[in-house]
Image (tube, rainbow, N blue to C red):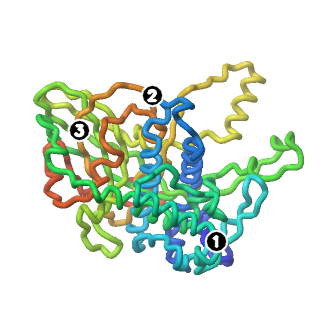
Amino acid sequence: NNTGWEDYWQKKSSGPVGNGGFDAPFTHVEERISYFREDVGLNDFLAQMSLFYPTWLDPKKYQEGIYFKRGELFYYTMQQISARYSLERIYNGMPKTDMLYWDQPIKVGYNPKVTSPGGEVLYPRAFNMVPRVFNPAGVWKAEIIERRMIDDLDFGIIFWVEYVSGPMGYSLTAARDPAFYMFLNRLMYIFKHHKDAMPAYTKNDLHFPGVKIESVEVSKLITYFDHFDIDATYGLPIPADKSYKDYHYFGMQSRLNHKPFTYKLTVSSDHPTDAIVRIFIGPKFDSEDHPLTLDEAREAYVELDRFAVKLTKGETVIERNSKESTAFTEDKEGIRSMYTRVKNSIETKETFYVTDSYTCGMPERLMIPKGSHDGRHFMMYMMVTPFEHKRQFESPIYCGGSQYYDGLPYGFPFDRRVEYEDVFNVPNFHREDVLVYHKYESEINKS
């Protein structure tokens, strides 16, 4: 059960773990996007980021190059999770996520039905629970921190999980709880308070002299739900360690996925130069199909990709596949698969290959929001900006390296308020209206 309704799975065979889809009517609006919150890969990503950026770690003592712009990157990670969640809500006809208020009830309950690694049961949260009533000491401390952050822009400690109980207190389960995104909204409000004090970008800030995006082609965007078997053997108590090889427990999850897609950019330049290409996707309409201004929509823009290119004098054609994204990554190898490879290597004397490379990012499956049968409208922004780079540590965006960092803030150019949309009308920016279609899994090979 993903949102606290004890009879949900008895009434329906759809949902995070089951054989059905997500087309049946729901008993509560929050159930519409349970497939997103319960995604194993998304929860794994959040847990990985919490381990990679522990609040107590001093990067000056531990490989400073790896933890490049650690604080800003952690904020950007949380902001992008919030933005991606907002996109999924909008196109499921759901209102914007409420902000978490200490004195107001959290309307939706939640029952995680899991225990912590230490054996502690994560108790359900009742409907309409008021944070201040439930945990007055924790709220008091949180308010002190918020005041300090707003008054002094002191962003040193922002994630006080020790004062949060239940699934939100564990990075492995936090993303499953609807209240987590209310908490993120509150956190984003504090950073927005800081960002809104900065001047809006001007055309001079965005313009790349001599460079122009001549044309853009995006292949058809199609989403679908696939059925994935989760190997849960190593998450269950087994009498003896040696018995793990004799037990196989699987759970089936319906997961949002998409067909691989490509985009092709033709860029002209009056001189050879290095550049960074950014690709974003965001909403065109709100949940009631009202057009959104760019300033209204910018907080829901998700960075799909960022990569370096060398522009030649004249035209350069850039082709990119969604599988190459530096912001999204494929699922990690499971323990069972790794164990089998090691075992086979020992028994057959075959070479066991070890790689020093690693990836981190949101699940590649969640790159684009769920579409519709007739196609849902989204906006894609492509931008080419100058790139002067001294390599420190090569890694994808969320891994903390500086490979794709060009001196601009994370989230640029959507990180600041937009006073005039005409500012984005510069030659090195391009806006593309795209449609996202949704198909049944059986239809995918036909499309």
Out of 161 and 344, give the one closest to the viewer.
161
Q: Is residue 254 above or below residue 291?
A: above
Mark 3 element type = strand
Front residue (pair 4, 61):
61
Q: Which residue is mark 1?
A: 135
C-alpha distance separating marks 3 and 1: 47 Å
Q: Position of residue 127 (x, y in %)?
A: 61, 79
CA neighbours of label 3 inside 10 A, class few (<14), some (14 to 19), many (20+) = many
Label 2 sits on what residue type?
A: Phe
**Residue 174 sits above or below residue 7 on the image:** above
Earlier in the chain: of badge 3 and badge 1, it is 1
Secondary-structure class at tag 1? loop
User: Which of the two marks, 1 or 2, is nearer to us in this view?
Assistant: 1
In this view, which residue lies farthest toward the right?
239
Q: Secondary structure at mark 2?
A: loop
Q: Is residue 242 visible?
A: yes
Give the residue at mark 3.
385
The numbered dot on residue 219 is: none
Q: Position of residue 278 (x, y in %)?
A: 30, 43
Q: CA distance from mark 2 to mark 3?
A: 21 Å
The residue at 58%/78% (across/down) is: 130
Q: Nearer the viewer, mark 3 or mark 1?
A: 1
**Hey, what amino acid is under mark 3?**
Thr
Q: Count the labels in the image.
A: 3
Res 385 quadrant in image: top left
Q: Describe residue 296's horizontal placement relative to residue 155 as left or right.
A: left
Cα distance, mark 1 to mark 2? Answer: 42 Å
**Residue 196 versus residue 209 in the image, above or below:** below
Work out whether residue 441 or residue 184 is closer to the camera in this orientation and state it. Answer: 184
Q: What amino acid does circle 1 point to?
A: Asn
- The residue sitting at 74% across, 60% down in the picture is 115
User: Which residue is the site of mark 2?
Assistant: 393
